[in-house]
Structures are given as structure tokens and as C-alpha cells.
Image (cartoon, rainbow, N blue to C red):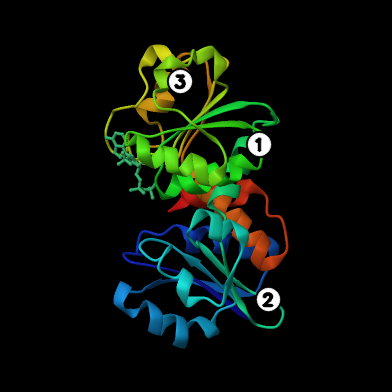
Amino acid sequence: MKNFCVIGCPIEHSKSPALHEAGFVEMDIDATFEAVEVQPEDLASWVRDELPNYQGVAVTLPHKESIRELLPAETEAASAIGAVNTIYREKDGTFIGTNTDGLGALKALLTLGTSLEGKSVLILGAGGASRAVTFALSKSGADVWVWNRTADKARALAQDMNVNFLEDWSVVPPENIDIVINTTSVGLRKWESLLPEDFWRPTHIAFDIVYEPLETRFLSDAEAAGAQVITGDHMLTYQALEQFRIWHGVELEAEVMNAAFFER
Ligand code: ATR
């Protein structure tokens, strides 16, 4: 029997156990997945004393950054993003920190069936979620532009990831943009969007990482204009699918985790 968990604080609302348990059932894997609350001041002792009991660990707020220095090694994705959301074990037992958030977002986009090569992508926001999404997109062949309310943060992020900085999104004709990703918290439990209704075109793809509500104003406006939309639950389920692939070496059908997301 293999043991897995998600650590965070608070943790009771985490969907990770449900998503991964659905995968265990589907693939007939003998494993457990628990949610463990770890206070920030207890993180170092938890890593020292408890981590060895697990085959893999999902890491969520507020530990994604602080756990890095407690792990013996990390992947290029974790270093570039500056955060760890997944810990796995090498064959020799060494724990490695990595980050599946960006790759998850990228895979969610690819489900629409269009290649990202040469596509013009506008990323709104320059916080932690944006770092993950921008990192993955920067390696996809897309032409990536980052905008943020606090311009200096977008400028620094764009430089770090070798993508373009956009001071004012309104100077770019909407027709020149293919995909818009909202990585900010604008729209979270509030009917508001960073973009005006008349920005949207039927050619656009809109992806919102906010999932409360699932139909944000950003996506609602885009859909009303005939654009394709990707709801925020996809960011969560696709990053978990990537974790599942790393931990178990198998590709799980997205539908299994999508169904589990809505079950509880
Ligand atoms: P996360 O880890 O979820 O990305 P974060 O690091 O706190 O959270 O980042 C929040 C993002 O939402 C930032 O890009 C923030 O913009 P600032 O850097 O200017 O603060 C953005 N954001 C939050 N509220 C916003 C608002 N009302 N208008 C525009 N951007 C907002």
C-alpha cells in the first residue's frame, strides 16, 4: 500500500483527496490519499518526521514557496516558477520538488485541439499562478504577453520567463490576440472582469483560473461573443492529472478527475 497526501493550511476544502482517490479506483491502485493540515511553523518538522511516510505529496497554500529549501532537490519547473506543488520520490528514495500547475494549464488548453505554436497569448496577472502558467506557455511555441495591474511585476516576470511585457492591453487590437488567460483573483466571488464586454471576439479562447463561480464574468462575456471558454476547474484537475502521471506512471482519463471534482 502506498500513501499520499496533500498538505496545506487550511486544508479541509481541498479537492485533491477526491481527485486522486477517483484515480485509484479507476486504475485499481492500492493507495491512500489524505488531507493533512500543517501550520507554517510546523512545516520543517513535518518534512523531517512525516514526509518519509509518503510516496508522494501535493503541496498547497501557504507552503508552496517555503517548502523549497526543505527539500533536497527540485526540478527546473519548480526553480523557474519558484514554487513546489508536488513532491515525488526518485528510485533511490530522494524526494524531489516539482510543479505541475503550469503544465496542467497548458494541457487544459491543448484539449481544445489547437496547437499553441505561433498563437498570441495574453496572460493577465503576475502572481504565483501566473508564474506557473507563463513558464509552461513560454515553452509551448506561443507568443506570450504578460500584463499586470502593477506593471513592474509583469515586467520582471516577463524578463524571467523570456516572454513579452505588455504595459497596456488596450493598445493591442483584440483581433491580434488568440488566447486570454485570467490568472488574477478578479472575478472570484464577484461579478467583475478585467476586460470590457466589447473586447471579445468569436475567434478568442478564454481561460479563467478562478473557479468560484465556474462561470465568471470574464468567461460569460467571452462566451456571449462566441468565444471558446475553459473554466477554472480544469486548472485544478489537469495539474492533478500531471501529479498522477508522475506518481503512478500512468495517464488517467481527464473525465475521471473532472467527474470527481463535481461529486463532493
Ligand atoms: P496567486 O498566487 O493566486 O497568483 P497572488 O500571487 O496574490 O495570487 O497574485 C494575485 C494577482 O491578482 C496579481 O497579479 C494581482 O495584481 P497586483 O500584482 O497588481 O496586485 C492580481 N489582482 C488582484 N486583485 C486585482 C484587481 N482588483 N485588479 C487587477 N489585478 C488584481
Quadrant for ligand 1 reads top left
Look at the image and tell me in which quarter the N terminus lies.
bottom right
Q: Residue at x 44, y 47 (%)?
A: 129
| Label 1, label 2: how far apart the Cα atoms are | 29 Å
Q: Which residue is mark 2?
A: 90
Amino acid under disc 3: Ala
- Number of other residues with Cα within 10 Å of mark 1, as a class: few under 14, some 14 to 19, many 20 or more: few
Q: Position of residue 87 (x, y in %)?
A: 56, 69
Dot 2 lies on which element? loop
**Residue 223, position as x, y percentages in the image:** 47, 20
- The residue under label 1 is 110
Between 110 and 18, the residue placed more toward the observer is 110
What kind of element bears circle 1?
A: helix
| Callout 2 amino acid | Glu
Residue 222 against residue 29 in the figure, above or below: above
Query: In what quadrant of the picture does the C terminus appear?
Result: bottom left
Distance, label 1 to label 3, CA atoms, is 18 Å
- Specify which label sits upstream in the sequence, 2 or 3: 2
In the visual, does 187 lie left or right of 25?
left
Quadrant position of residue 169: top left
Q: Do the residues under discs 1 and 2 have CB atoms within 8 angstroms?
A: no
Q: Which residue is mark 3?
A: 222
Which residue is rendered at x = 49% and y = 12% of the image?
173
Determine whether 36 is above or below 200 in the image: below
